[in-house]
Amino acid sequence: MSLVKLQILGYADELFSKRVAKFNVQINPDSLKLDRSINYTDTQASGEPQKQKFGNLPSSTLSFDLIFDDTGFVDHIQGNINDRIGRLEKATYSINGETHEPNYTLLVWGDFVFKGRLSSLNYDYSVFKPDGAPLRVKISLKFVGYKEGSEKKSPDLSRIIVLKAGESIPWLCQKYYNDPSYCVEIARINRLKGFRDVSPGTRLLFPPLARDGRAGR
């Protein structure tokens, strides 16, 4: 089984339809920290016990660390550390010249998909060449989940889609469900081992969303 690397994809638009940057990590993170929370407000009527009333669901957050290493202990990838930092920042941090704001980001690693935007980026340099060029840096990233402005709308009828060259299941899920994270569910429905490396010409069932938000038959 081949090693799957975390991908960080940058998009210029909130529909995640115009990809402008792609970054593959050198070393996969040791862990991912996904935080979700619920906000409540305390209410209390006269003479009654205090109650917690549901407020809202804040955006989830995802945080992890990456290591860039040019010491020779791990496989080297194209460019030096500064080059790779530039490509990472292009996907996540730098201001897009067309939209005048940072990109929207889609993070894909195996069956894990997270749609959001970068909220913080920190560098910790630890090893250097004699001339001061960095040889190792730990990068701490935090992303805030992107929340749609309106509820997702499912197609009225099931669709049979023939996968074309250059397309992917996450891209089709974004197109038909407005959410690429349904790719795992679509792979399950179509009895695939995963949503990656699906051959062009494969016929895929895309059913309407059920009431619980899952793609149902």
Image (spheres, helix red, strand yellow):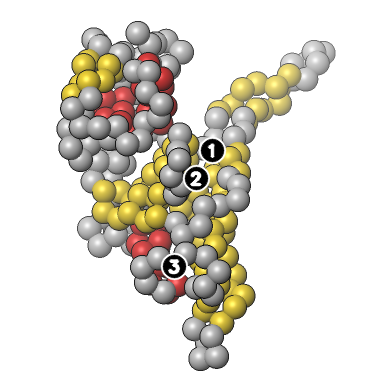
Q: Secondary structure at mark 3?
A: loop
Residue 151 showing in the rendered view: no
Q: Residues within 10 Å of mark 1 (few under 14, many from 20)?
A: some
Comparing labels 2 and 3, the label whose residue is closer to the camera: 3
Q: Amino acid at mark 3?
A: His
The residue pinned by badge 3 equals: 76
Instruction: Please say if the residues under marks 2 and 1 sit with CB atoms less than 8 Å apart.
Output: yes
Closer mark to the observer between disc 3 and disc 1: 3
Specify which label sits upstream in the sequence, 3 or 1. Answer: 1
Q: Earlier in the sequence, mark 2 or mark 1?
A: 1
Q: Which residue is mark 1?
A: 60
| Figure quadrant of the C terminus | top left
Q: Report the residue at 66% width, 28% height from top.
A: 41
Seen at 44% across and 67% down, the residue is: 76
Graded by Cα atoms within 10 Å as few (under 14), some (14 to 19) or many (20 or more), the crowding at tag 3 reads some
Residue lying at the far bottom of the rendered structure: 131
Q: CA distance from mark 3 to mark 1?
A: 33 Å
Q: For label 2, count other residues whose C-alpha is less than 10 Å away and answer few (under 14), some (14-19) or many (20+).
A: many
Q: How far apart, in angstroms, are the residues tagged by discs 2 and 1? A: 6 Å
Q: Secondary structure at mark 1?
A: loop
Which of the 4 quarters of the picture holds residue 187? top left
Which of 165 and 43 lies nearest the eye of the viewer? Answer: 165
Can you identify the residue that label 2 sits on? 144
* Label 2 to label 3: alpha-carbon separation: 30 Å
Residue 207 in sight: yes
Q: Position of residue 156 (x, y in %)?
A: 24, 11
Depth check, front residue: 51 or 178: 178
Instruction: Report the quarter where the N terminus lies.
Output: top left
Mark 2 vs mark 3: which is more N-terminal? 3
